[in-house]
Amino acid sequence: MNLQEVELARSQIFEIKGKSAPIVVVVNKIDLISSSFEQTVQHQPANSSDETTSTCTHNQHKSSFLCLEMVESLVTCDWGHGFVAASAKDNLNVTQVTPVFFRVTVRILCYAAAIKVLE
């Protein structure tokens, strides 16, 4: 599933469940990202001796350049949903999906309760 399909699924969830539906976006197979599609960009800021590393993914099928960090920022900051980068193969963060979903649900419920109190 690509990001456009995730946006479509998100829209469909909102149509059916409403804008307050709890959503967690899970990026799976990050083991493949780090082994096959990883590009590491290292640069040194002009005023620092520290080296900064950023890991991004390159989708060869669509020739699009997409950083995992950018997707996480879109999902968590812009959309306000939960986000988990996982690998079932490496058993990485698989057990984090449910706790993140519960945190998102509690946040939405608390927000809804706070709005009712203010009304």
Image (tube, rainbow, N blue to C red):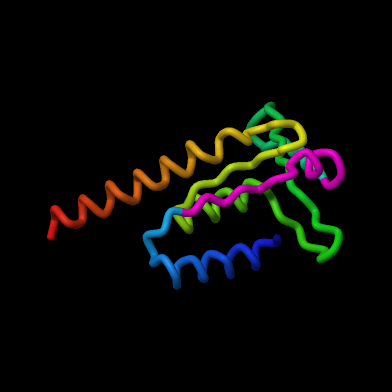
Q: Is residue 47 magenta?
A: no
Q: Nearer the viewer, residue 2 or 74?
A: 2
Residue placed furthest toward the top: 49
As drawn, is 72 to the left or to the right of 2? left
Q: Nearer the viewer, residue 31 or 66?
A: 31
**Residue 32, x across and y down, in percent:** 81, 43
As drawn, is 74 to the left or to the right of 69? left
| Res 115 → quadrant | bottom left
| Res 50 → quadrant | top right
Residue beneath the point at 78% across and 44% down: 33
Q: Nearer the viewer, residue 102 or 59?
A: 102
Residue beneath the point at 80% across and 54% down: 58
**85 above or below 14?**
above
Residue beneath the point at 62% across and 34% down: 93
| Res 102 → quadrant | top left
As drawn, is 109 to the left or to the right of 54? left
| Count of numbered marks | 0
**14 above or below 97?**
below
**Residue 83, x across and y down, in percent:** 55, 46
* Quadrant placement of the N terminus: bottom right
Q: Nearer the viewer, residue 35 or 67?
A: 35
Start and end of the magenta stretch? Answer: 23-37
* Quadrant placement of the C terminus: bottom left
Residue beneath the point at 53% across and 64% down: 10
**Residue 88, x across and y down, in percent:** 72, 38
